[in-house]
Image (tube, rainbow, N blue to C red):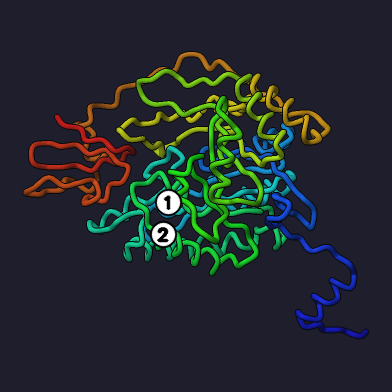
Amino acid sequence: MLRLLLPLAGLAELLCAANIPRRTFGIDYDCNCFVKDGRPFRYISGSIHYSRVPRYYWKDRLLKMKMAGLDAIQTYVPWNYHETQMGVYDFSGDRDLEYFLQLASETGLLVILRAGPYICAEWDMGGLPAWLLEKESIVLRSSDSDYLTAVEKWMGVLLPKMKPHLYQNGGPIIMVQVENEYGSYFACDYDYLRSLLKIFRQHLGDEVVLFTTDGASQFHLKCGALQGLYATVDFAPGGNVTAAFLAQRSSEPTGPLVNSEFYTGWLDHWGHRHAVVPSQTIAKTLNEILARGANVNLYMFIGGTNFAYWNGANMPYMSQPTSYDYDAPLSEAGDLTEKYFALREVIGMYNQLPEGLIPPTTSKFAYGNVRLQKVGTVVEVLDRLSPSGPVKSTYPLTFVQLKQWKIFLLLLSDDVFPLTLYGSLLCCV
């Protein structure tokens, strides 16, 4: 038996000779469109955040999105979700991003990855780890050396994991977003964006499409856009679609039109009524966007849940609740809604809808009454809630100084007891 060993270069030539098509995804500035495998391509995408949906339900939600006629999904990567402690990384269980990407690919969905480091997303600290604040002089989302050092280290972990999942490498990721809505931040640090661009290119290569997302106005694009990063915009239903895309054209005179966040609903705030946006309003504007040949991502297609106090807050301070239902086409529980079918009908006018059955809404059960038994007061069980004992200090300490990112504190006289619970709250008795 003759064994033939080919060098990599020879293998590449052999594949070309066999006419095996090469997977490519890029931008055609002359034709104002994306190009996938050499052909013009327009995506209709929907947002799903793996951090807001338990792993057990990922497949169900992704299949429902596919059956709605979507080409792709869009997801954020929350840095603090994977590195809760400095230098300790967790990509297991509900944090298994690579498994999530694999499921998306198996479902026939492309992926638009929003890698951060800042993601906003109504998520705790916008995805930035609270331990960054241990350096009191640090300037977040800037070219501050301490901040960039931490970012480089994190991206040196995340991006190499993502590279095999890029479309040209056989995976589902067609585009990667750098930062998020930086034009809405008070800073205007182009050196910061240039540093991020360099880091992303270093780890992902030159072929992948890198992009930014900002509000649909020249004001927001002024500090959010950067040469080398394709500028996209976001805007809500019911507005002037032509004017919104003209704002994108101020930064990108040619290339595909993209709304990276077309809002299917809105977020909730504590003390306010649940946000509701009519299906007809969204369907009408979605039709206008697609009729122009533009690319769109529906934010959110399923909102999910802010588990374990991962909810964020807006300024002036208004916190989000545990629910991130978002009045999305798929409910917080993944249920099919009237909005789902209304948007599916519009999408079906432009994409061929998949054949087959849509996974049904999950069954609901009445569990009856649950009897609760009192264990004791906080003070009575303090030895179990705070096994490390009190922290004594002459002066008040911040949560950061106590290294308690999401834990209750109990203040008793001059003693502060870190409790083994979650949350950012100071209890005084």
Left or right, 373 with respect to 337, comes to left
Q: Which of marks 1 and 2 is nearer the N terminus?
A: 2
Residue 96 appears in the figure: no
Q: Where is residue 374 in the image (x, y as percent from the top left)?
A: 30, 22
Mark 1 in CB contact with mark 2 (< 8 angstroms)? yes
Location of the C terminus by quadrant is top left
Residue corresponding to mark 1: 223
Q: Where is residue 318 in the image (x, y as percent from the top left)?
A: 33, 30
The disc labelled 2 sits on which kind of residue? Tyr
Which one is nearer the viewer's eye here, 417 or 405? Answer: 405
Which one is nearer the viewer's eye here, 207 or 75? Answer: 207
Residue 208 appears in the figure: yes
The disc labelled 1 sits on which kind of residue? Cys
At 60% across and 32% down in the image, what residue appears?
241
Q: What element carries label 2?
A: helix
Categorize mark 1 by other alpha carbons within 10 Å: few (<14), some (14-19), many (20+): many
Q: Where is residue 120 in the image (x, y as percent from the top left)?
A: 43, 43
At 36% across and 35% down in the image, what residue appears?
313
Q: Where is residue 352 in the image (x, y as percent from the top left)?
A: 81, 35
Residue corresponding to mark 2: 190
At 60% across and 21% down in the image, what residue appears?
281
Q: Is mark 1 on a helix, strand or loop?
A: helix
Count the labels in the image: 2
Categorize mark 2 by other alpha carbons within 10 Å: few (<14), some (14-19), many (20+): some
Q: Say above or below: 71 vs 165.
A: above
Q: Distance between the residues labelled 1 and 2?
A: 7 Å
